[in-house]
Image (spheres, helix red, strand yellow):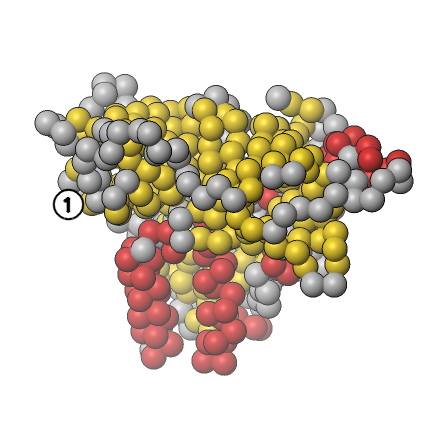
Amino acid sequence: MKHLLPLAALTLLWLPTACSGQSAPATVKPGTYRAVLKTKGGELPFGLDIQPTAGDARTYAVFAINGNERLPMDPATVQGDSIRIPMSLFESELVAKIDGNLLRGEWRRRRTAQQVQTLPFEAQYGVTYRFKTEGKPAAKANLTGKWATNFGSKTGKVDTVNAVGVFAQKGNVLSGTFLTPTGDYRYLDGNVIGDSLFLSCFDGSHLYLFKAGYDVATKTLTGGQWAGVSGYESWVALLDPKADLPDPAKLTYLKPGSKTLNFSFPEPGGKTVSNTDPRFKNKVTIVQIMGSWCPNCMDETNFMSPWYKRNKQRGVELVGLSFERSPDMAESGPKIERMKQRFKIDYPVALAGTNDKAQASKALPDLNAVVAFPTTIFIDKKGQVRHIHTGFSGPGTGKYYDQYVEEFNRLVDKLLAE
């Protein structure tokens, strides 16, 4: 479904009772809900934890639950008989009518000023399972391990490895993610039912549903992935403890003849940030190529912001170059500011252009290409680029995240010691 109305207008249309003043606001039962988005691939489940805010009977704290992740949404509000749960960072929201133990409505995400994507949404109070396993066959296999994966396979075989699945299974409960050369699929949670895999994730912006059947003879998973409102891709995965991806340090690099990264872009407040600014002189500088719309960038910023607070006195600087859906500061500036507030960022974040990778590459002509958001660039005290890391392995990847943090700190320590 697509609505050609601004998001705020849609919200007002959904809440007629709130405008009439004819009845007191409904109340939401506090606790855990099993939520589903109704996609073309079927129900995409995720957890919601809804708790009242002290001192305000109409405001609630809400968390989206995917495996071990409790992702905070923005404060939810109740008006009339409906609840609105926003995720302003991603310009999305859940809006639903309250009907006892059931919330029923839709998820909305603004794509452009005139286009809003929607999917039907329901949430049932007190239900904690992910995919329904009661009355279904027990898991016939344990899928724990590394899986060489080919998304978009046209042969039904893993002839090209463009992702690595990392799964952990206990009983019929399955968790994990897929690592790709440009980032990961964050926290996936689900079940193994009989010889079939089911995984899902909802983070306010991205929504993924994975289904696959397992062939024990070939140790192969074959299935499909549904993403967003209409995306679909087939995938095949082969159990392979040696599965690996291309070196993330070799995908983006300086063009011959370039030694530094030249940039000069405006912050939302109007100040221009440039690599020649005095704040970067004789300091190790980390450049974060990012976007407020990007969940992997969100994970990286969640690491970077507190790291900078702990380490800035050591002679290190951070700067974010944000590539947004619009080059217009009037539209994208507030998104950058919301991101800075959410993650308590106290280093500069400038609007560098649009999130089209070709346009981002033109904005940074010293690089061969921008192939992923995020991309992290390490510059030494002399202003020379020393290392470029494409993508980010977030906390949903487990040991891969720990390895990234270790390598990040080791590199910064080395550059600071020079």
The residue lying at 83 percent from left, 44 percent from top is 24
Depicted 86 relative to depicted 398: above or below: above
173 or 11: nearer the eye? 173
Depicted 146 relative to depicted 309: above or below: above
Query: Quadrant of residue 161 in the image?
Result: top left
Extreme residue toward the left, this view? 217
Residue 331 location, x and y as percent? 71, 44
386 or 311: nearer the eye? 311
Residue 387 location, x and y as percent? 35, 59
Position of the N terminus, as image quadrant, is top right
| Left or right, 27 with reference to 320 | right
| Left or right, 327 with reference to 236 | right
- Mark 1, residue position: 242
The residue lying at 51 percent from left, 65 percent from top is 305
Question: Can residue 37 be seen from the camera position used here?
Answer: yes
Depicted 285 relative to depicted 326: above or below: below
Label 1 residue SS: loop
Question: Can residue 367 be seen from the camera position used here?
Answer: no
Extreme residue toward the top, this view? 155
